[in-house]
Image (cartoon, rainbow, N blue to C red):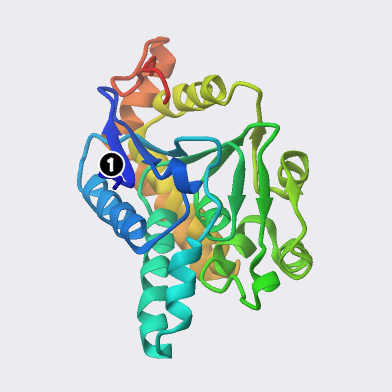
Amino acid sequence: MNTQPTVLVSVSKTGVATLTLNRAEKSNAFDPEMITALLTALDQLKKQNNIRCLILNANGKHFSSGADLNWMKSMVLKTEADNKQDAAQLAALLDRLYRFPTPTIAVVQGAAFGGALGLICCCDITIASPQAKFCLSEAKLGLVPATIAPYVCRAIGVRQTQRYMLTTELITATMAQTSGIVHFVSDDIALQTQHIINSLLNNSPNALHTIKQLCQQCENNPIDQTLINYTSDLIAHIRCTPEAQEGIQAFFEQSQPSWSIRHDDKIH
């Protein structure tokens, strides 16, 4: 019996949190235990003021093959009410990751199918190996990728999402980058991840947190007077914050603001 935790959680001295899917022997397939572990970890990390960014990665050959087949088989035999409660857990996980206050980075190797692709689309930045493969394969089983659909549509647009959901075709790393699922394809995903982390740690934590909120406001609202007022009020407020004042002063003095740090920890 495997007694290893399904999700490993760590926080570096520079505030880089890492959530590692740890069911390598099952290709990191989701089951209720893993979903609960991810939810718990996200909720705990959100409360820590020292977190500067979050990495979501996986041990083993594959990022995740999607839902655990034995879990799916068991849910077929349960009531619609049971299935609704079960689906709500995954929906809650996707929402927590999408709204996590600091920048989030998905690091992908091997397969990332079904719900795993949903998690990736909830992250702000995605790095993949050239051999990574993606797929929205639910229709092959008579299912639909319902809970992940809002995040996939937001990440790559409705038209691309429809194509991949309808055809269930295998998406290569190159296709994923062209579609917007992936931002960087690298032979050395650990090194590329560290480059991104270094960029993030050079920026104001408050600014990054606020930028995530700003982008969601711009995405979900029409460009009307309400949004225009929101953006005007936001920049006026930010200019008066301690981090902005320190950052502007440091720029003119050609010095480093206090938040600017480098991350040299090894990415696992």
Q: Residue at x 58, y 60 (%)?
A: 114
* Residue type at tag 1: Gln
Residue 39 appears left or right of 252? left
Residue, far top: 254
Residue 122 appears left or right of 13? right
Q: Residue at x 42, y 23 (%)?
A: 267
Q: Which residue is mark 1?
A: 4
Q: For residue 130, which quarter of the picture?
A: top right
Q: Residue at x 36, y 20 (%)?
A: 260
The spot of residue 63 in percent (x, y) is 53, 43
Element type at mark 1: loop
Q: For residue 24, which quarter of the picture?
A: top left
Q: Vertical placement of 197 versus 224: above or below?
A: above
Residue 66 appears left or right of 83? right
Total tally of numbered discs in the picture: 1
Q: Answer whether residue 60 is visible to the viewer in this image.
A: yes
Q: Answer whether residue 239 is visible to the viewer in this image.
A: no
Residue 63 appears left or right of 136? left
The spot of residue 61 in percent (x, y) is 55, 36
Nearer-the-camera pick, 136 or 199: 136
Q: Residue at x 37, y 31 (%)?
A: 204
Nearer-the-camera pick, 59 or 119: 59
The spot of residue 127 in percent (x, y) is 59, 35
The spot of residue 198 in percent (x, y) is 45, 21
How many residues crowd around disc 1 within 10 Å: few (fewer than 14), some, or many (20 or more)?
A: few
Q: For residue 172, which quarter of the picture?
A: top right
Quadrant location, the C terminus: top left
